[in-house]
Image (cartoon, rainbow, N blue to C red):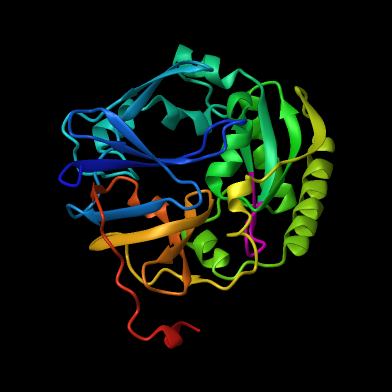
Amino acid sequence: MTDTRYLVHGVFWPAPPASCPALRLQAPDGTFREIALDGGTRLGFRLATEGKSCLGHHRVHGPAHRDHVLCAGQSPAARGNQCERCFVADDFRLMHDFHRAGGVPPGLRSYLMQPHWLYVATFANGASKVGTASDLRKWQRLAEQGAVAASYVARAADGRVVRILEDLVTRDGGLPQQVRSAAKAAALAAPAPASELTARNAALATTARRVISAAGEDGFEVVDEGWSRPGLAERLCSGTARHAYPHTLASGQHGFTIRSICGSFVLAALDDADLEFVVDLGQLKGRTIEVGHYTSEVPAVQEALF
């Protein structure tokens, strides 16, 4: 397997009761392989090429039915993780303006007309956001984003209503709709106490409920429901000693043993080093790697990390 090159599609979390996320890899023949990322897994790889390649696009046929169409030539990524042609062909790109324009293909409309949830997510440094999740991906959406604490604040009849509510919470409650991955990774290098993050999330969720309750919109109900963080995230979200991973995942070879995982972020132990590091495997998305018994270089002067 060490000579096979794989295109990384990212870290994916399954729906409960399954609990172990996986790194999804596309082989040259278009088949997929998944590497389970549970505690104790050793992950070794080297970057095989420079830059990122297109991950294809989706055709949506309904709430639980979609086709993932692979990029014919694995073209260089131009917009996010897609080439220009796949970006234009992707049904999901139209989703975020559905509540404003409304013009979407029938399959995507069917997907968007299922119930959706409005949530408030808080990350390891207290940074928080408002977001939405479809009924079928209610739990995974937050797991894949790397939330440390989260609350559901509304259940909407469809994706149009929930996005109206999301914009209201941003406008009137001051909550952004995005927190950068780099900020999440940096926060996990020194996470705030769990009690502080839980209290902050609860306060922001209360504000969001107040905003949407006064909005005069129809088609939703206010809810007060907590989100259960995956057990594999506990150590990474705790205050144990750790450091930012000192190497870029854009080149070179890497190898470490996973101790804990939250979203796409792992707490990793390097070979022959009595230290743990926060590694953002999301940086591998769209990159081509070779999997094998590779190792990460241990920092020459470990004391400098303290």
Is 191 colored magenta in this rendering? no
Figure check: 143 above or below 50: above
> Whole-percent x and y of residue 43?
36, 53
Q: In the rendered view, does 96 fall on the left or right side of 118?
A: left
> Whole-percent x and y of residue 81?
33, 42
> Whole-percent x and y of residue 194?
73, 61
Residue name at image x 33 percent, y 51 percent = 284
**For residue 197, what is the image quadrant?**
bottom right
Quarter that holds the N terminus: top left
Q: In the rendered view, does 159 fall on the left or right side of 196?
A: left
In the depicted view, which residue is nearer to us: 187 or 5? 5
> Whole-percent x and y of residue 227?
71, 41
Residue name at image x 29 percent, y 71 percent = 297
Is 123 colored magenta in this rendering? yes
Identify the magenta region: 122-130
In the depicted view, which residue is nearer to us: 205 or 47? 47
Q: Can residue 216 be seen by looking at this rendering?
A: no
Q: Can residue 26 be seen by looking at this rendering?
A: yes
Residue name at image x 26 percent, y 45 percent = 78
Q: In the rendered view, does 182 fall on the left or right side of 299?
A: right
Number of marks: 0
Figure check: 105 above or below 303: above
Figure check: 137 above or below 152: above
**For residue 189, what is the image quadrant?**
bottom right
